[in-house]
Amino acid sequence: MSNMSPSSSFIERATPRRAPLPPLAPGLPVIGHALAILRDPLGVLTETMRSRDQVRWQVGPFRFIVVNHPDDVRHVLITNQRNYIKSRTYKPLSLVLGSGLVTSEGELWKRQRRLVQPAFHHRRLAEFADTMVACARDLVDAWEGVDQPIDAHEAMNALTFRIVGRTLFSTELAGEARAMGEALGVAIERVAEMAELLLYLPTWVPTRKNRRFNRARKTLDDVVLRMIAERRQEPGERGDLLDMLMAATDEE
């Protein structure tokens, strides 16, 4: 996770408490920083990261607090995490991710966190890191001697799905990388649009964007469900994340 944020667009205070607020970054009357963020969101984040540990933004009627220092990020996410809840921005994510760790809260989050804890032991993560490094080196080696422009977006998609395939499913997803990459891009774009809107039509309403989103979601679901079905038909210890997650049980 980058230490450039989180901001209150993703995390809200669970209980009110009076405390000094960070300074408000210079902006325009009424609309605040909306135009600057729309024009160059990465540039605004980068400048904020370089100049301040904490800052407030205003986007129309909404105000956000961005924290950049690792100590502040740790305070929000770990040491004082009970004081913060996930905002409505996370709700559209559940359309793609379901009610998992990223989107759940409270007791459901605690139960899920307990279930997956063994899969993310430091030793296991170190093993997965070796796989990630090996895949990245293979990609760099493949670029050696290439005397033409490379589509970095497509290459990173392929690399990501290769790593996911090996660490999660102990298989290669190279043949499906393009389709999954396109589907994921469509899903993320639509979820981001929903997160920015106060009101949006349910995904079952057959608008052009909803139909496109639902096709993308089905593509992603089909691949994951097929992998799970194949594992159930051919059980065996592979030592990957899917093994650990399927074997996870809740002691309570």
Image: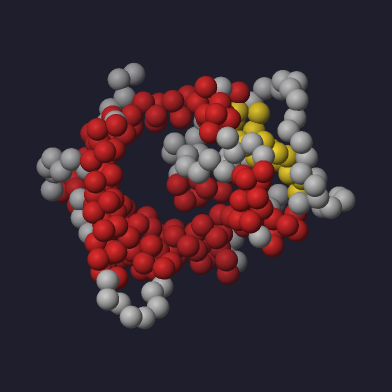
- Quarter residue 190 falls in: bottom right
Question: In the figure, 27 relative to 86: above or below?
Answer: below
Q: Position of residue 248 (x, y in %)?
A: 27, 31
Give me the residue at 24% from left, 62% from top.
138
Tell me if I can see residue 21 in this picture. yes
Q: Nearer the viewer, residue 120 or 227?
A: 120
Residue 73 at what x, y percent from top left?
Answer: 55, 33
Q: Quadrant of the C terminus?
A: top left
Q: Is residue 3 left or right of residue 29?
A: left
Front residue (pair 194, 83): 83
Q: In the picture, residue 116 is in which quadrant?
A: top left
Residue 83 location, x and y as percent? Answer: 60, 23
* Camera-side residue of 102 and 77: 77
Residue at (24%, 46%) from the top-left corner?
130
Residue at the image point whose x is 26% and y is 43% from the top: 128
Q: Position of residue 251 (x, y in %)?
A: 30, 20
Count of all numbered marks drawn on residues in the image? 0
Residue at the far right: name it: 29
Residue lying at the far bottom of the rendered structure: 148
Horizontally, residue 84 falls left or right of residue 241, namely right
Is residue 3 shown above or below 18? below
- Determine the residue positioned at 78% across, 40% down: 24
Question: Residue 243 sits in which quadrant?
Answer: top left
Looking at this view, is 204 or 20 the one in front?
20
Does 201 appear above or below 97? below
Residue 245 seen by the camera: no
Placement of 45 over or under 205, stated as above or below: above
Colour scheme of the rendered structure: secondary structure
